[in-house]
Each structure stands twice: as structure tokens, then as C-alpha cells.
Image: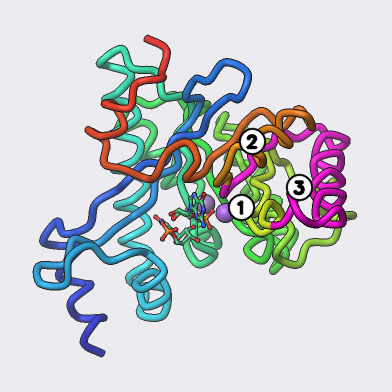
Amino acid sequence: LHLESELWRALADNQLVLHYQPQIDLLSGKVVGVEALVRWRHPTRGLIGPAEFIPVAEECGLILPLGHWVLLTACRQARSWIDQGIDMGEMAVNISAHQFRQPEFAQSVRAILAETGLDAGRLELEITESTIMHGVDAAITTMAELRGMGVRLAIDDFGTGYSSLAYLRRFPLDRLKIDRSFLADIDSDPDAASLLTSIVLLGRSLGLQLVAEGVENLAQAEFLRSLECERVQGFHFYQPASAEEVVGFGGFGL
Ligand code: G
Ligand code: G
Ligand code: MN
Ligand code: NA
């Protein structure tokens, strides 16, 4: 495959970049976290999004070195911001299933934290429901090891995958990221609004923190505020942007 061989070169030639999308606290208006999102600066095709190349990387095994690069780069950036007196809150990093299931995954996270000098509590790993529902006991072992180090764990795209609520209680978790599909119709469809409300209550009753993704308008932000789901992420606030651009947005406490 053409894309596959190009992607191996992209990693070696520094063509991959991370963009960061701020998460906002609705009460203070401050940036309380950022999600790292990988992009490929292709020499001729311009900026390519992860939806196009992450699946390719998953298939050819490149996801392991790529995932390692993403984690290392995101932790370095988080540490660099702290060194500059810039508080962006938690650095959230997407972890693919294959990466998470490596027996040495928790150890590699520990090594990256040691190498970058980032506090474990500043790192939040985003994993999907399917990642942890496939091999529950192994997943819990890995999650417990990470959490024992102080690393935070979030379920990404929550509500779209297959996770039994009984299991949800057993997983050592810090946060649910409410998938953006649950926000789409809340201003026009009362059932959609009820469903979102139920998810927020579910998360809260399990003692989990929440972030709502894909907030695209003021009405959605106001509804989330009324539910006391304060942490939000979406185009209404910020697009994913380069590290330099994100600093330029301001909104972070110094
Ligand atoms: O940024 P964008 O909306 O195009 O991202 C599309 C998908 O790619 C999202 O589901 C996101 O979780 C995933 N993604 C973005 N960056 C990374 C990454 O560094 N690693 C993995 N595994 N997935 C990522
Ligand atoms: O699956 P994951 O949550 O990691 O995907 C994050 C992706 O969602 C990012 O790549 C980002 O580009 C996209 N995204 C972020 N905010 C919004 C938004 O408000 N609306 C839509 N449609 N996509 C968003
Ligand atoms: Mn994510
Ligand atoms: Na998501």
C-alpha cells in the first residue's frame, strides 16, 4: 500500500504534528485541559487528518511507534508549557486498542513521564469502550497500574461503544467523554435532551468527572451548564490548533 510506506517515512521524517484542542470550564471560562490530536503534514497533499491514516497505522503495526511518538511529544509539550508558567491543565492523549493492550504499555508510560518530568496527574489517557471490553481483566490490571502511578483515565466517545454498565463500575476511571452525537439534536428533540441528561447523571452517580465533546453552539453550552456538566470541548470554543496557536488563544491561568 502506497499510504503505508509513506506513513513509515512520515514518522522518520518528522512529518507528523500534534494539534491541541482546549477543554474549557464553563464556570470560569478557563482552559482546564487540552486533547492532543495527531495530523500528518504531507509534503504534497497538505494536512491529513487521523481518520485517514490511524486505521492504516493500526493495520500495519505502525500504530505502536506512532502512538509512542504521540505520547512522548504530548508529554514534552505539557512539560514545556509548565516550564513557561503556562497552565493548560491536563494533557489528554488518545490511545489505540493495540497500544493499550501491549503488556508493557503501563511501563512505557512510566518511562515517558520519567523522561519528560511531567507529573502523572497531568496526563489523561483516552481509551474507548471497545478497547477495555475486549479482555476486561487484563484491561483492569493495566488501568490499575496506570492509575496507581497517578495517571488519569478517560473513556472516549462514551455511549457509542459497547460497554456494560455493570463493568463500567469495575473499571478504575476518572472521566467519561460524552460523545458528540449526544449533543447533536438536543435543541430540537426532547428525547435527545433526556438522553444527554441521563448520561450526565449516570456519570455523576458513578463518581466520574465528565467532559462533553463536540459543543458547536451556545444553546448546547447553556444546556450543559444547566446540567452542571462544566467541562466542554468543541468548535464553539476552540478548534484543534498548533501548540503556538493554542498559547495565543489565552484563557489559561498563569
Ligand atoms: O482530529 P480528528 O477529529 O480528525 O480525529 C479523528 C479521530 O482520530 C478521533 O477519533 C481521534 O480519537 C483519533 N485520533 C486523533 N489523534 C490520535 C492519536 O494520536 N492516536 C490515536 N490512536 N487516535 C487519534
Ligand atoms: O474520537 P475523538 O474524541 O478523539 O475525536 C476528537 C475529534 O473531534 C477531533 O479530531 C476534533 O477535530 C473533532 N471535534 C472537536 N470538536 C468538534 C466539534 O465541535 N464538532 C465536531 N463535529 N467535531 C469536533
Ligand atoms: Mn479523543
Ligand atoms: Na471522542
Circles 2 and 1 in contact, beta carbons < 8 Å: no
Numbered disc in front, either 2 or 3 = 2
How far apart marks 2 and 3 lie (CA) works out to 29 Å
Q: Amino acid at mark 1?
A: Asp
In this rendering, the answer to whether 227 lies above or below 74 is: above
Magenta residues span: 185-214
Residue 113: in magenta span: no
Residue 207: in magenta span: yes
User: Percent x, y for residue 130?
Assistant: 67, 66
The answer to whether the residue bearing label 2 lies less than 8 angstroms from the nearest atom of ligand 2 is no
User: Percent x, y for residue 223?
Assistant: 73, 36
Q: Secondary structure at mark 3?
A: loop
Q: Residue at x 44, y 35 (%)?
A: 22
The residue wearing badge 1 is: 156
The residue wearing badge 3 is: 171
Q: Is residue 15 left or right of residue 245?
A: left
Q: Residue at x 48, y 30 (%)?
A: 33
Q: Amino acid at mark 2?
A: Ala
The numbered mark, 2 or 3, whose residue comes first in the sequence reads 3
Q: Mark 3, residues whose alpha carbon is within 10 Å: few (<14), some, or many (≥20)?
A: some
Residue 221: mark in rendering? 2
The answer to whether the residue bearing label 1 lies less than 8 angstroms from the nearest atom of ligand 3 is yes
